Amino acid sequence: MALLLLFLGPLEDVAGAGEIALDVAEPLTLAAIAERLEPELAVALVGAKIRMALNGNLVAPGEVMAGDGDELAFLPPVSGG
Amino acid sequence: MALLLLFLGPLEDVAGAGEIALDVAEPLTLAAIAERLEPELAVALVGAKIRMALNGNLVAPGEVMAGDGDELAFLPPVSGG
Amino acid sequence: MRIAGGAFDPHAELADFANGRESAGGIVSFLGQVRQEPGDAVEALELRHFAPLTLPGMEQLVVRAESHWPLMAVLVVHRVGVMMPGDPIVLVACAAKHRRDAFASADFLMDHLKSSAWFWKREKTGEGWRWIEPRDSDHADLTRWQDVP
Amino acid sequence: MRIAGGAFDPHAELADFANGRESAGGIVSFLGQVRQEPGDAVEALELRHFAPLTLPGMEQLVVRAESHWPLMAVLVVHRVGVMMPGDPIVLVACAAKHRRDAFASADFLMDHLKSSAWFWKREKTGEGWRWIEPRDSDHADLTRWQDVP
């Protein structure tokens, strides 16, 4: 098991993959998760317009506590038109 | 040849037929045409809401001059909805 | 634009209309059909028209819509004659680059077709045929479009 | 309501939808397709979504429309994946007793599907794939519907 991070839309290009699995010992805050990632990706993920869904439900960034077996999706603004 | 009168929509029921051919010696006004018809039909045709088309073109009642070979259509208000 | 004296297949018409219109981002269609509700007494509907006025009127209406909205294509098919419940009466489709133009022009065409065209309608029930009276609400619909020349 | 991972035939869908809806006086449909204009550089379009949010969001939208307008039935089919020019992207159809309700609800659904649903879009040209940015005008579209709870 692991914490699965999903990168939707253009964030996939920044992450270099649609998902990244992190081995985590205990549930992590968003800040702690960002520390485990490449700096460029970490900066992109904490942008003001990125929404997050924990196990399919939208959560505020401050509410993120994600551990083993969880799925945390990062959702950039949707495309227009 | 004759003057052909067409009765559209509900006027057909009043006229008892979709069309009536009148033998005419010379072009007639609306009043003169009405005199040649059954009184009930004549009254229905000169109602304020009846439009007329002479040979396919809308005409004002006062402009009607219809003779041999002409087609005069009487158009009641169209149905709603 | 055409008046159909007999039954038509609206979905085949729409498929033909969309075919080859790849430059249109959106196609809005309206299909009107003879309504039948459970317990409804209407057995048949007849529409009659006066071709010398109906056809130019419909053509003018299409020209008016095409002048006001940037449309790629317009389809209007209107039945006349005797129809049964469930039969298609009218199909309007507007293809446009932009969705909003397709919606507005289809809406406009329907408001005007139903209220301004030279159609007389009668319904058949167990008691026989009965002509449908003119309705005032259609005129209210038309005031929505006063800015369309 | 469904998300289609592969190609769908919008006219067959519409025919199925209309079939058996004899109690509806009118059916309004919107078909959105991958636009291709002559000289257009777009070779393909990809739509991605996040199913755990997209599906409940679309279901909620349909419920909202059905609560606000008296509708007989609503159809929403939305493609995801890679599409070619001319391919259908989205089909919305609303069947109602009254024409005006069918038009308004289809218009409402399209405004909200395009702007609120969780879809990300990228286009392929000779220079490769490029993500489409969010657009402000979609938000303007939504202010049209502020009286719909």
Image: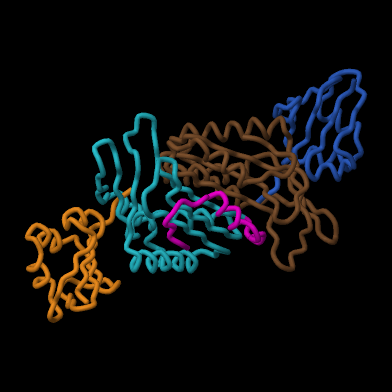
Chain colours: A orange, B blue, C brown, D cyan
Residue sitting farthest toward the bottom: A26
**Furthest residue in direction front, as rendered:** A1
Instruction: Name the residue located 72 percent from the left edge and 36 percent from the top edge.
Output: B51
Tell me which residue sits at (28%, 56%) in the image. A78
Question: Which image quadrant for residue C61?
Answer: top right
Eyeballing the image, is A19 above or below C117?
below
Q: Give left or right: position of B2 versus B77.
A: right
Q: Residue D119: image x %, image y %?
A: 32, 56
x and y percentages locating residue B3 in the rendered image? 86, 25
Question: Which residue sits at x=23%, y=65%?
Answer: A6
The quadrant holding residue D23 is bottom right
Magenta region includes residue D13: yes
| Whole-percent x, y for residue D148 in the image | 41, 64
Quarter of the image with the C terminus of chain D is: bottom left
- Residue at 48% x, 53% y is D91
First to last magenta residue range: D1-25
Q: Is residue D43 above or below residue D4?
A: above
Labels in figure, total: 0
- Left or right? Give the position of D89 relative to D43: right
Q: Is residue D71 left or right of residue D45?
A: right
Of B51 and B12, the residue lying toward us: B12
Residue furthest to the top: B26
